[in-house]
Amino acid sequence: MPNFSTPLSGLQAHSAAIEIVGNNLANLNTTGFKASAASFRDVIAASLGAGSSVSEIGLGVQAPVGTRQFQQGSIQLTGGAFNAAIQGDGFFVVRDSVGRQLYTRAGNFKIDSAGNLLTQSGESVEGWSTSTGGTLVATGGVNNIVIPLSGTRKPVPTQNFSVDLNLDAGAVIATPGAVFSTPVEVVDSLGAKHVLTATFTKTAANTWDYDVTIPGAELTAGTVGTPSSVKTGTLTFNSSGVLTTPAPPPPATNGVVNVPVSGLKNGAANLSMSWSLYDANMNPRVSQYSQESSASATAQDGLIAAELLQISLSDGGKIVAQYTGGRQEVVAQIALASIANPDSLAGAGDNNFEVTSRTAEPTIGTADSGGRGKILSGSLEASTVDIAKEFTNLIVYQRGYQANSRVITTLDELSQETINLKR
């Protein structure tokens, strides 16, 4: 009898819905897993009668569609050095062994012996990375992230330095108080450190001469025990103790004193350094007030050679290498993909998704840009499966299955009654 097809479709549909619930519950603790919801659809009804007495008889239900729900999962702190969670929209971009570009919300990454950043199932994580000593530029196409696990970072010679200090406006000329010295440590091209000494001598009201020296023993033309002068000049202040000469920028050459050091005995290249007398906001770094002469801060951009200590992932998806001497360097940046209709993605296994013909073109960029979410380090996104909701659905689908089986039993009894009428 055709009437059996309707409840049989109900059995099949509710059985499939129970499978969806079972899959959700099986992935209750799967990192970055997105639960699916069963969406039932009816079958085109049959029309009975004609004219104004037309009625429709349903022909059952189609197999339900499992629609993946891409809501935000809870963020769980793990402290893992290479754990990352996405807060907001977006997917990590990975590539499998056959070259397929896949997408995932699971950020439990690892590094292999060659420095490749991988997912737990072995897919390569994509983004931007830099070679030794290079500069990271997080634009353009993405590639598999490879992290340097060893090696020495070459030194960077000092190009700029600054000294924040105050010179005593009340100092009396030709007395010890009218002379003030402060050291500045700089780095040459071989990574060796040199200590320059900036000496300030008051020569008139609101006027101080300066002399920058280096130990003579460090220069081929120097004399041991005698400082060698590398730069001299004059600073003048107005009646409010504000530096007026050299004048602040612009032009660019104002407020900057070129300090050259040539003929280093250790064979390093000559140094050509810029001494910045003003900060980025054009405020003088040197003042003259009636307070004891003192230096409050020094800074320089040279770096000595350094050995790698550790690699870690920081907020924003930056992978930072830490070296001896406190040196840090961003060596890679994890990419995020923004997909306008993520519910169109198909599961590819191992916590990954792949695009389908219905998927909008993914746009790839850095975290917290272009609508993409934030990347939180030391965290993982938990599964979105709600165990209470799934058990409720399980009971509902079980009742639906039982109800349809009861319909089949009833139809069977009616069939038997019909057959018995002919006897």
Image (cartoon, rainbow, N blue to C red):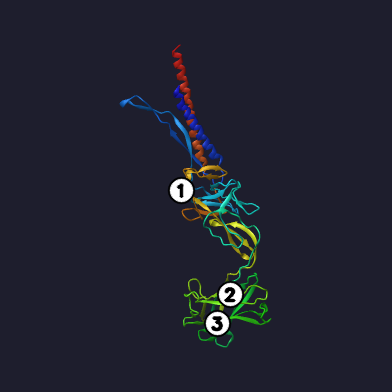
N-terminal label among 3 and 2: 3
Callout 3 crowding tier (Cα within 10 Å): few <14, some 14–19, many ≥20: few
Locate the N terminus and report the quarter of the image it occupies. Answer: top left
Amino acid tagged 3 = Gly
3D distance between C-alphas at marks 1 and 3: 62 Å
Mark 3 lies on residue: 233
Mark 1 lies on residue: 340
Amino acid tagged 2 = Ser
Which mark identifies residue 272? Answer: 2
Percent of width and height locating residue 236: 50, 82
Amino acid tagged 1 = Ala
Image point (52%, 77%), residue name: 286
Percent of width and height locating residue 413: 47, 19
Q: Secondary structure at mark 1?
A: loop
Percent of width and height locating residue 266: 68, 74
N-terminal label among 2 and 1: 2
